[in-house]
Amino acid sequence: MPFDYTLDFHSVDFRQHPELYRVGRGEQGVLLVQPYKAEILPHWRFKDAAAARESSETIYGLFEAYLKAHDFVGADMARKFIQMGFTRARRYANHAGGKKYAGPVPADKKGQSGAHGRAELPRNPHPDVDKVEAAAIFKRKWDEAKANPEYLRQKEAFIEKYGK
């Protein structure tokens, strides 16, 4: 099932209502799903390799704590923040100021990933080396999270119980 962007994200507590959560693809919903956004976002930093190392380790610690508490939604959200650390660091390495697409996000697409018909801006011919390293740090943690046996077990159980 696709991620449901029609939910009232200001009032839904996904810890109390995990049945409303959709695993989705990639980073879908990462900046919407509460209370996890509030718990994880303060630790999310990717400005350079040092920040990425500290951030990815802290968020991976949250990922493990959510798994230990059998809170798959929290673990999946932590995985999404780690993935987003990788993608944002790469975006800032490749595009000056992190702006990847020309023009504003259409009003009806705010909070959703994608180009939404906008052209990609030219890439920086000399990517920011520190941002490239920051992305690599997050990529390693993301790969570790995706392959974590307990995460995979809980993901399968969640999908079996609630659907994808």
Image (spheres, rainbow, N blue to C red):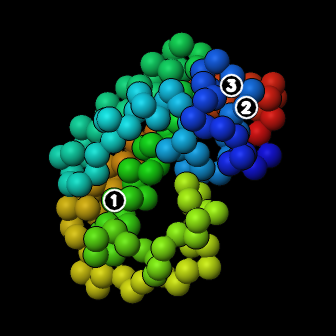
In the image, taking residue 69 as reference, residue 89 lies left or right, namely left
Pointer 1: residues within 10 angstroms few (<14), some, or many (20+)? many
Q: Please tell me in which quadrant of the rendered image residue 114 appears.
A: bottom right
The three-letter code of the residue at mark 1 reads Ala
Where does residue 48 sit, x and y in percent of width and height? 20, 54
Q: Which label was assigned to residue 89?
A: 1
Q: Residue at x 81, y 35 (%)?
A: 163
Measure the alpha-carbon separation of dots 3 and 2.
Answer: 5 Å
- Closer to the chain start, of discs 2 and 1, is 2
Q: CA distance from mark 3 to mark 1?
A: 30 Å
Task: Please say if 127 is above or below 16.
Answer: below
Q: Residue furthest top?
A: 69
Residue contact at pointers 3 and 2, CB within 8 angstroms: yes
Q: Is residue 151 visible?
A: no
User: Which quadrant of the rendered structure holds the C terminus?
Assistant: top right
Asked if residue 84 is positioned above or below residue 109 in the image, the reply reads: above
